[in-house]
Structures are given as C-alpha cells and as structure tokens.
Image (spheres, rainbow, N blue to C red):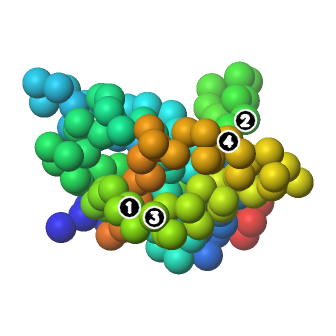
Amino acid sequence: MFRELRRKKQQLPNELTEEILLKGTTGILGVSGDDEYPYTVPVNYVYEDGKIYFHCAKSGHKLDSIRKNDKVSFCVINKEQIVPEEFTSYFRSAIAFGRASEVEDDQEKLRIMRLLNAKYSPGLDEAGEKEIQRDWKILCVIQIEVEHLTGKEAIELVKLRG
C-alpha cells in the first residue's frame, strides 16, 4: 500500500526515524484540502507510542479537511545543512502516513495537552494548566495513528554514520 523508499541506502533505521519524531519541534501536516488541493501546515506536536498529537481550534481548514478525509501525512526535518559548493544539502527527515482523528476523551485530551506543555514550555506547569483551562472550550486535540513511517538522510550523512 505504501511505496518503498527508492534510495534504500539513504533509509534510516526505525529507531533513528522515531528519534527524529521525538526530538523534532515542528512538523508539517499534509491533508486533502478544499477542492482536492493538498493543504500543508506547520504544527507543534508530540510523538508517543506510534501516535502523533497536536492541538487546534474546533473549527478551521485543518479540522475540516481531517473530518472529510482522515488520511494524512506528517513530515519532520531534523537536519538541514545547505552545502553550496556541493550543490546539495545534508538533510535528515521523517515522513509518517496515518489516520487522524479527534481525541474525544477529556482525560486523554488533558494528558496530551500536558505533554505538549511539558515539551514546549518546560517548568511552566502551573501557567500551562491555566492556559489549557482558559482555552478548553475551543480546544481540539488530534491524534495521528501512524500506519507507515520512513526516515531518510543525505548520502553524505550515511557515509559519515557508516
């Protein structure tokens, strides 16, 4: 169902690919948008146990698109070093494909918001709780159940890792 990576020598092992998702700060969500146009948008996220989580408002383009078609892609770039004299870049990235859905359970939603808070605002637990409660009524949490995950790096990095 999912394509194999064409340049197999550049494929990262699963543990390194998951590490990219764990350590990344911004992911690019790809959905099927209005009039079948692809729609991509950067989001802050957290990765845990084969699932990607992010939050959004209870209305908007992302959520409308997910409700219409739950199949999504998600990309995180871990390294990007432009090397002008070689006419290339040294990159490392992960791409996940999966199905997105709204987290309905309030306890799970709160747990995920606390994970996001700990990742992006460490040490600000009390202020984070207030922020979560302030926006609770308009807050939607999305989970992506990862069905396929691949990581890839520039051939130059493969040689260094060798």
Q: Which residue is mark 1?
A: 103
Q: Amino acid at mark 1?
A: Val
Q: Kindly report the distance in space between the C-alpha atoms of the residues bearing marks 4 and 3.
A: 16 Å
**In this orientation, which residue lies closer to the viewer: 77 or 50?**
50
Q: Nearer the viewer, residue 34 or 138?
A: 138
Please name the residue that numbered disc 3 is placed on: 106
User: In terms of depth relative to the viewer, which is nearer, 138 or 35?
Assistant: 138
Residue designated by label 2: 81
Residue 22 falls in which quadrant of the image? bottom right
Say which of 2 and 98 sits in front: 98
The three-letter code of the residue at mark 2 reads: Gln
Question: Mark 4 or mark 3, which has the lower sequence index?
Answer: 3
Q: Position of residue 104 (x, y in %)?
A: 35, 62
Q: Which numbered disc, 1 or 4, marks the residue that appears first in the sequence?
A: 1
Find the distance from the CA under tag 1 to the CA under tag 4: 19 Å
Q: What residue did someone put label 4 on?
A: 131
Q: Is residue 44 visible?
A: yes
Amino acid of disc 3: Asp
